[in-house]
Amino acid sequence: MATLSSQMNLIVEKTKNLIQMCEVLQEENDLLKLEVQSLKVAFDASNDKSKQLEERVKALAVARTLDSETDKEAINEKILDTKQKINDFVREIDKCISLLK
């Protein structure tokens, strides 16, 4: 009978240990979920910043092409190209606005 009692005590102890380990793992899981959420926010912010910088690079490229050209035909062609790029930007902005809605 003593062996049965000692086995029950052992089972109870192991169960308590498992419950404690489960609680510790749950806390760690919660912390990791918060970290993942924080990293997602940081990643989204980085993507937004990257897109803004890409747009600035495009705008600077357009400005440079306009400054470097002196031939009238080339200037007219660049103006049309610039208008097309502006139209593309407007379409992209409209898409973003529609996605936000």
Image (tube, rainbow, N blue to C red):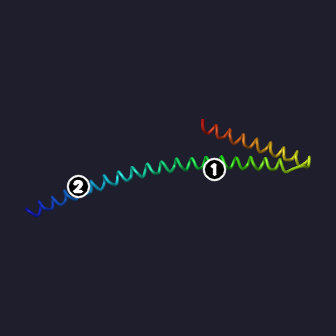
**SS assignment at label 2:** helix
Relative to 48, 72 lies left or right: right
Between the C-alphas of marks 1 and 2, the distance is: 51 Å
Name the residue that disc number 1 marks.
50
Q: Secondary structure at mark 1?
A: helix
Give left or right: position of 5 versus 52: left
Label 2: which residue? Answer: 16
Q: Residue at left 57%, top 47%?
A: 45
Q: In the image, residue 74 lies at what x, y percent?
A: 89, 49
Residue 16 is situated, as x and y percent measured from the top left of the image, at: 23, 55
Question: What type is the residue that disc 2 sits on?
Answer: Lys
Q: Residue at x 43, y 48 (%)?
A: 34
* Amino acid type at mark 1: Ser
Sequence-earlier tag: 1 or 2: 2
x, y (%) of residue 72?
92, 46
Q: Residues within 10 Å of mark 2 (few under 14, many from 20)?
A: few
**Residue at figure coordinates x 19%, y 56% from the top left:** 12
